[in-house]
Amino acid sequence: MNTTEAVTFFIIEGLKDKYMILFSVFLTIYVLVLGGNSMIMYITRTDSKLHSPMYFFLDNLSLCDIIYTTVTIPNMLSGFLVEVKTISKTGCFVQMYFFLSMTVTGRALLTVMAYDRYLAICHPLHYMSVMTRKVRFLLLFLAWAFGWIMPLPALILALPLPFCGPNIVKHIFCDHSSVVNLACTNTSRNSLISLIIALVGLIGTFLLILASYISIAKAISRMGSAERLKALGTCGSHLIVVCISYVSASCVYISYRVTLFDSDIRLVVAVLYSVLTPLLNPFIYSLRNKELQCALKRAFSR
């Protein structure tokens, strides 16, 4: 679709083969994401034994995951039900911003949780005096503010871009690079800014998490076997979530830089990336955390 008129809406290409089985699969995944993360939020807020900093941050991570998937999955599901999936230009940029924001916020919350585990294991005697209620809310505010602010430069630069055709977004939602590539002007500055945001938002947070776990590993190496198992139990779930999150992000990055990958394969990788961590988080924390398991039993017994 080539035109000289300004584009007022975009067509989301999505997955080319619109099988109803895919609709059922992703609908089930979305229900599980909502149910699992809502349950985590409910028990961390209502169970008095879970009113610790670790579960306070976990509650916010679950909220972030719910928003993150709600931005993309319902829109993707509707694409399976219609022949041509359209979205207004304004709606496209709103979806783009919230997706980028929740992506960065999720990484920031994982970084805050890593710092919390560092204090608990490396400085247990000073943990409660350092991780006060005021500090908890400050860290939480910084994590969310970091997520809201980081994508703004990319969005501000993308908004005034002229779109004069084609208007087909080759993605399952309004992905930043997919939309910017449709602009009928030079977008090298946009690509540079998005790369900087990715480096700061992903690699920057990863390095902070890595530094926390290096310190944790050193502290654990000096402990006895019983203390070591207890320490590993308190940070094992978080470490698994971090690995899944950053490995899946790396796979998406590689798939978009390697030309051998088919476009449909890139979309499937992107879909898995957008749902994998939010789907697995509740199960990982529930299965590996005895306190959460006991809290779930108490909730169901009530």
Image: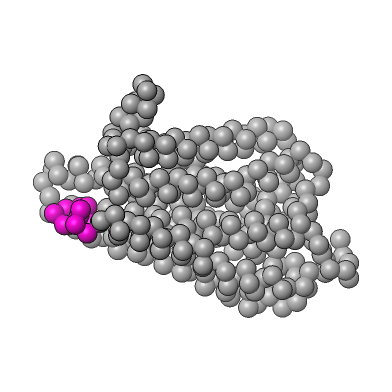
Please determine whether, in this image, residue 213 is positioned above or below residue 237. Answer: below
Q: Look at the image and say whether residue 187 sits in the magenta stretch.
A: no
Q: Position of residue 58 (x, y in %)?
A: 38, 46
Residue 250 visible in image: no
> Is 225 placed left or right of 163 in the picture?
left
> Is 136 placed left or right of 39 in the picture?
left
> Is 240 placed left or right of 121 in the picture?
right
Classify residue 77 by image quadrant: top right
Classify residue 194 by image quadrant: bottom right
Q: Position of residue 169 (x, y in %)?
A: 73, 58
| Residue at the image position 63 percent from the left and 53 percent from the top | 266
| Residue at the image position 27 percent from the left and 37 percent from the top | 49
Q: Which quadrant of the rendered structure holds the C terminus?
A: top left
| Residue at the image position 46 percent from the left and 63 percent from the top | 145
Q: Quick one: which residue is furthest to the top in this view?
A: 301
Q: Position of residue 93 (x, y in %)?
A: 67, 61
Query: Magenta residues: mostly which secondary structure?
Result: helix
Q: How is the image coloured?
A: one colour
Q: Position of residue 50 (x, y in %)?
A: 30, 39
Please determine whether, in this image, residue 5 is positioned above or below residue 260. Answer: below
Residue 154 visible in image: yes
| Residue at the image position 49 percent from the left and 44 percent from the top | 278
Q: Please give the range of residues in magenta.
A: 118-130
